[in-house]
């Protein structure tokens, strides 16, 4: 694993002119006057040879997706993938207004656009330097509860108080630190006009001075969580920073090595319904520039970065502990690190149980009167539900069973889907029904069987398969094979391997002429529901097997009926993996091109691409790109695959998530 870090100062400069200070609602809208401590952007790159991610911690109040997408577009120029870039603000309440909310009057943005341009430039600068400083590292992790420094001012007994420390070391030398704490950086007073990173800025500097490297802060599960010295000013900030730093020092003496050299990334788009009229108004006024996918729905995303049993969960706003913690309880062997304000800052996510629009008096010491709190700074309850649903999904690891009658079917029709699923750490089992004894040019059946078997295994391994099961039926004979026996084989395989997802041929494609494809579709889909009947194949239960229900199916075909296509997958990220996998089926592909050449000849045609002097890898490359480029173009992706996806269907509307 390689790691690099860098930091660049982002303190506003005089030449930018007036800047509004951001963080608290006040009548005056104070301008920045002076500096308490400099603010920075800090970046950290991790690279495991396959994946490269960049974490960017910005000392400001919040950043919206429109700005972050500009930053991401800039960083693509440095060879980074957008989905591997995580930009998060520390949420200091003493930085410049980077969201527009703290301007001179309602309807006027407090953003200084010269500063935003400068900020973008500094972020690129920081990442560029980071990429030049990659070194081999080991990763260490530790955490600790620090109850005495933090208050949940809505629910006294529900304090989330975890202080997390991840360190990246080359030998004994610390290259980088990522630390998180869930107390909002709001120790500066409401009258403060000086720039400061608040307590996280001070702590990061202490880490850098005494331990070395660059120390990135990410705000944890921060909804309604405040430091004990909330709004008490700089002296108290110094005290809190010392105490947090002391906590980190104690943790650093007892770190455990994360023995993994692999980064696994998961990302889920989340469509967040916007129910808050104030936010809508701000958007209409042009102060916010929220990305709407349809009327009053904002598309944002959550992410998960996994290294060994360390799971960093990224959330685009400020989640309440009560919204997230219950979802994590059953994963007892995972270390979770929650990062808020990542890739967007869209307000609070409040759980249903705590939602309350009646004015109440909170535990926060300085607010004596009753008022409606966080609900006014939240998109609404539906957004919280959407975040929870996405988190449930991102946490779940699945077993996928992909069934191919012939060696190349699953690679060609679903290679992109399977590569994406295994990239996310899901388990793939491939079942190949026939032996492909005839699929070659000029080889004996024995040689053909051997080669196709080996080539299929290579191809499936490239797609991430853990296991391949060959059923060795003679090819192109499934139509006359005993259906009952074949179905039992699949019911049993499903009961043994318990797949959450099955990928295979669709039952009713248009113009399917290959009988093996038709029988495979029939028998596998049949077995999917029969496997969960306790009266079918009862002798399996005596062998210790149990019924099993397949939750999802992705069905493909050469001519999938357009009316049943309901799942469009952008496979641009994995197109090279797909091409590489398809290229492994050398024997089958050679025959495929040969057969097309014969068909061309039978029609008095010569197709240059099919002539033997063009090497197969090039032909495969052109073919896959052309075919899956056309499918992708049908829904706006560079390369795409389409499926009929079956899952709970109408039960989604009736049920409650569990
Ligand atoms: Zn086939």
Image (cartoon, rainbow, N blue to C red):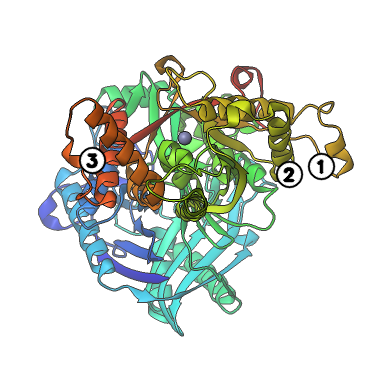
Outermost residue toward the right? 542
Where residue 402 appears, as percent x and y from the top left, is 55, 40
Figure quadrant of residue 473? top right
Query: Which residue does the image show at 62% across and 24% down from the upper left?
Result: 648
- Left or right position of 379 against 502: left
- Left or right position of 96 against 415: left
For the N terminus, the image quarter is bottom left
Q: CA distance from mark 1 to mark 2?
A: 7 Å
Where residue 149 appears, as percent x and y from the top left, is 58, 60
Circle 3 — which element? helix
Q: Is mark 2 within 8 Å of ligand 1?
A: no
Frontmost residue, 549 versus 658: 549
> CB under 8 Å between callouts 3 and 2?
no
Label 3 Cα neighbours within 10 Å, binned few <14 / some 14-19 / many ≥20: many
Q: Is mark 3 within 8 Å of ligand 1?
A: no
Where residue 521 appears, as percent x and y from the top left, is 56, 27
Q: CA distance from mark 1 to mark 3?
A: 49 Å
For the C terminus, the image quarter is top right
Give residue 38's mark. Answer: none
> Which badge, 1 or 3, comes first in the chain's sequence?
1
> CB under 8 Å between callouts 1 and 3?
no
Identify residue for label 1. Answer: 545
> Which badge, 3 or 2, comes first in the chain's sequence?
2
Identify residue for label 3. Answer: 610
Identify residue for label 2. Answer: 496
Frontmost residue, 22 versus 208: 208
Circle 2 — which element? helix
């Amino acid at each position: 694993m390689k790691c690099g870090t860098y930091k660049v100062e982002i303190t506003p400069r005089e030449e930018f002119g007036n800047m509004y200070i951001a963080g608290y609602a006040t009548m005056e809208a104070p301008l920045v006057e002076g500096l308490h401590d400099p603010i920075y952007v800090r970046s950290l790159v991790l690279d495991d040879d396959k994946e490269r991610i960049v974490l960017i911690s910005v000392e400001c109040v919040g950043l919206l997706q429109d700005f972050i997408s500009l930053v991401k577009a800039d960083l693509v120029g440095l060879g980074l993938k957008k989905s591997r870039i995580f930009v998060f603000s520390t949420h200091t309440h003493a930085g410049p207004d980077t969201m527009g909310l703290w301007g001179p009057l309602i309807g006027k943005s407090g953003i200084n656009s010269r500063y935003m341009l400068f900020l973008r430039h500094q972020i690129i600068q920081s990442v560029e330097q980071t990429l030049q400083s990659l070194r081999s590292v080991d990763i260490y992790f530790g955490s600790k509860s620090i109850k005495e420094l933090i208050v949940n001012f809505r629910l006294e007994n529900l304090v989330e108080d975890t202080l997390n420390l991840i360190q990246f070391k080359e030998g004994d030398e610390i290259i980088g630190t990522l630390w998180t704490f869930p107390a909002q950086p709001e120790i500066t007073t409401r009258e403060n006009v000086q720039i400061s990173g608040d307590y996280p800025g001070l702590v990061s500097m202490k880490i850098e001075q005494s331990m070395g490297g660059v120390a990135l802060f990410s705000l944890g599960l921060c909804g309604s969580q405040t430091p004990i010295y909330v709004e008490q000013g700089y002296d108290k900030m110094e005290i809190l920073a010392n105490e947090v730093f002391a906590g980190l020092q104690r943790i650093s003496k007892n770190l455990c090595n994360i023995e993994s050299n692999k980064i696994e990334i998961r990302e889920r788009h989340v469509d967040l319904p916007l129910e808050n009229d104030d936010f809508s108004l701000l958007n209409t006024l042009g102060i916010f520039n929220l990305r709407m996918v349809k009327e009053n729905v904002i598309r944002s995303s959550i992410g998960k970065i996994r290294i060994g049993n360390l799971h960093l969960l990224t959330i685009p706003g400020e989640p309440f502990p009560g919204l997230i913690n219950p979802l994590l309880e059953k994963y007892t062997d995972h270390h979770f690190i929650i990062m808020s304000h990542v890739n967007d800052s869209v307000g609070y996510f409040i759980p249903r149980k705590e939602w309350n629009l009646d004015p109440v008096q909170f535990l926060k010491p300085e607010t004596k009167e009753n008022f409606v709190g966080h609900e006014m700074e939240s998109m609404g309850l539906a957004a919280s539900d959407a975040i929870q649903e996405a988190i449930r999904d991102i946490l779940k690891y699945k077993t996928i069973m992909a069934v191919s009658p012939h060696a190349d079917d699953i690679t060609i029709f679903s290679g992109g889907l399977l590569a994406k699923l295994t990239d996310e750490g899901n388990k793939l089992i491939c079942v190949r029904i026939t032996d492909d004894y005839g699929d070659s040019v000029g080889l004996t059946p024995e040689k053909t069987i051997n080669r196709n078997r080996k080539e299929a295994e290579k191809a499936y391994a490239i797609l991430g398969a853990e296991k391949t099961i060959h059923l060795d039926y003679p090819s192109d004979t499934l139509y006359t094979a005993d259906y009952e026996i074949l179905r039992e084989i699949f019911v049993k395989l499903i009961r043994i391997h318990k797949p959450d997802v099955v990928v295979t041929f669709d039952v009713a494609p248009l113009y399917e002429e290959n009988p093996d494809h038709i029988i495979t579709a029939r028998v596998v889909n049949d077995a999917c529901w029969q496997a969960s009947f306790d009266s079918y194949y009862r002798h399996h239960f005596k062998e210790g097997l149990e019924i099993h229900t397949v939750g999802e199916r992705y069905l493909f075909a050469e001519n999938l009926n357009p009316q049943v296509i309901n799942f469009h997958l952008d496979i641009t990220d994995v197109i090279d993996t797909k091409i590489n996998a398809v290229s492994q089926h050398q024997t089958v592909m050679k025959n495929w091109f040969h057969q097309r050449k014969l068909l061309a000849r039978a029609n008095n045609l010569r197709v240059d691409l099919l002539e033997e002097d063009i090497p197969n890898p090039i032909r495969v490359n052109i073919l896959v790109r052309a075919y899956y480029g056309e499918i992708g173009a049908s829904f706006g992706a560079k390369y795409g695959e389409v499926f009929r996806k079956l899952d709970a269907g109408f039960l989604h509307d009736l049920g409650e998530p569990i």
